[in-house]
Image: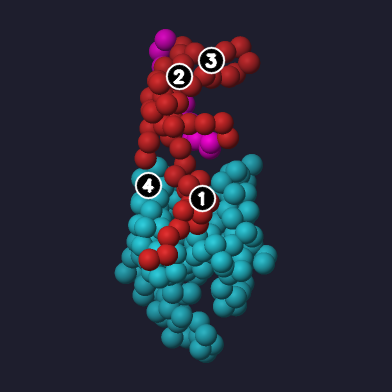
């Protein structure tokens, strides 16, 4: 059976934690499906950091602390693969960022794309439509 | 990460039982998701390392949120 690899960006993490987020229920449902299936989960440290910031701002300090602890436990128990971003990936992302004309694309989008390319990831769990321009399937379909 | 290790004997239909002590220590209840690593040992029994997938708890974090 083929193992699906999913990258979760900060908008995906945030939608899971923020009860009032317009895609909260869809995000939870999709995340549950991921946990129930043979899916490998990936993220990177900039997406985690950005998610923690938004969660602290909108859901409260204790939720942000609990979330960061769960991420840490998940990494230690090998249920989640967090990329710490190497100089090489950062350099490739910057190169791509400077070559793109679309002003909506941020460096973090290019970092995600480099990670997705390197790890051969199939799907991005995100609600950030900007990522669609990289041609990788975005889930869940909101 | 909560883990527990125990020796178990495989029953004829492939089932394994988790000892009560481990269930209590990991606060396992029906429907909880766990990950199992099996290791065959010489006595033809299995050593089982078991732990909850911490990511399952993320689904419940939004319910415990507090505005500060």
* Residue under pointer 3: B10
Q: Residue A25 vs residue B20: left or right?
A: right
Q: Secondary structure at mark 1?
A: helix
Residue B30 lies, with reference to residue A7, above or below; the image says: above
Front position among marks 2 and 3: 2
Front position among marks 2 and 4: 2
Subunit under mark 2: B
Q: Earlier in the sequence, mark 1 or mark 3?
A: 3
- Is disc 2 surrounded by few (<14), some (14 to 19) or many (20+) residues within 10 Å? few
Q: Secondary structure at mark 2?
A: loop
Q: Is residue B39 visible?
A: no
Residue A76 lies, with reference to residue B12, above or below; the image says: below
* Residue under pointer 4: A73
Mark 4 vs mark 1, CA separation in Å: 16 Å
Foreground: A70 or A92?
Answer: A70
Q: Residue at x 40, y 42 (%)?
A: A77
Badges 1 and 3: C-beta atoms under 8 Å apart? no
Q: Residue at x 37, y 58 (%)?
A: A62
* Residue A91, position as x, y percentages in the image: 36, 75
Q: Is residue B3 visible?
A: yes
Which image quadrant for residue B40? top left
Subunit under mark 3: B
Which chain is depicted cyan?
Answer: A
Q: Earlier in the sequence, mark 2 or mark 3?
A: 3
Which chain is depicted red?
Answer: B
Q: Is residue B34 one of those drawn in magenta? A: yes
Badges 2 and 3: C-beta atoms under 8 Å apart? no
Q: Secondary structure at mark 4?
A: helix
Mark 1 vs mark 3, CA separation in Å: 33 Å
């Amino acid at each position: 059976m083929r193992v699906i690899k999913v990258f979760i960006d900060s908008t995906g993490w945030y939608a899971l934690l923020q009860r009032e987020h317009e895609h909260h229920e869809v995000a939870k449902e999709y995340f549950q499906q991921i946990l129930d299936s043979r899916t490998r989960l990936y993220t990177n440290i900039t997406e985690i950091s950005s998610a923690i910031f938004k969660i602290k701002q909108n859901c409260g300090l204790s939720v942000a602390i609990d979330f960061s602890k769960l991420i840490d436990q998940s990494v230690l128990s090998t249920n989640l693969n967090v990329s710490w971003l190497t100089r090489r990936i950062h350099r490739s992302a910057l190169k791509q960022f400077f070559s793109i004309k679309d002003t909506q694309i941020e460096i973090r989008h290019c970092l995600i794309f480099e990670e997705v390319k390197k790890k051969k990831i199939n799907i991005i769990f995100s609600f950030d439509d900007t990522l669609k321009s990289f041609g990788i399937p975005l889930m869940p379909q909101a | 990460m909560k883990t527990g290790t125990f020796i178990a004997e495989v029953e004829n239909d492939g089932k394994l039982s988790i000892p009560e002590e481990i269930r209590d220590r990991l606060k396992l209840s029906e429907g909880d998701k766990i990950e199992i690593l099996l290791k065959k040992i010489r006595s033809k029994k299995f050593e089982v390392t078991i732990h909850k997938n911490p990511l399952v708890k993320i689904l419940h974090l939004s319910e415990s949120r507090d505005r500060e």
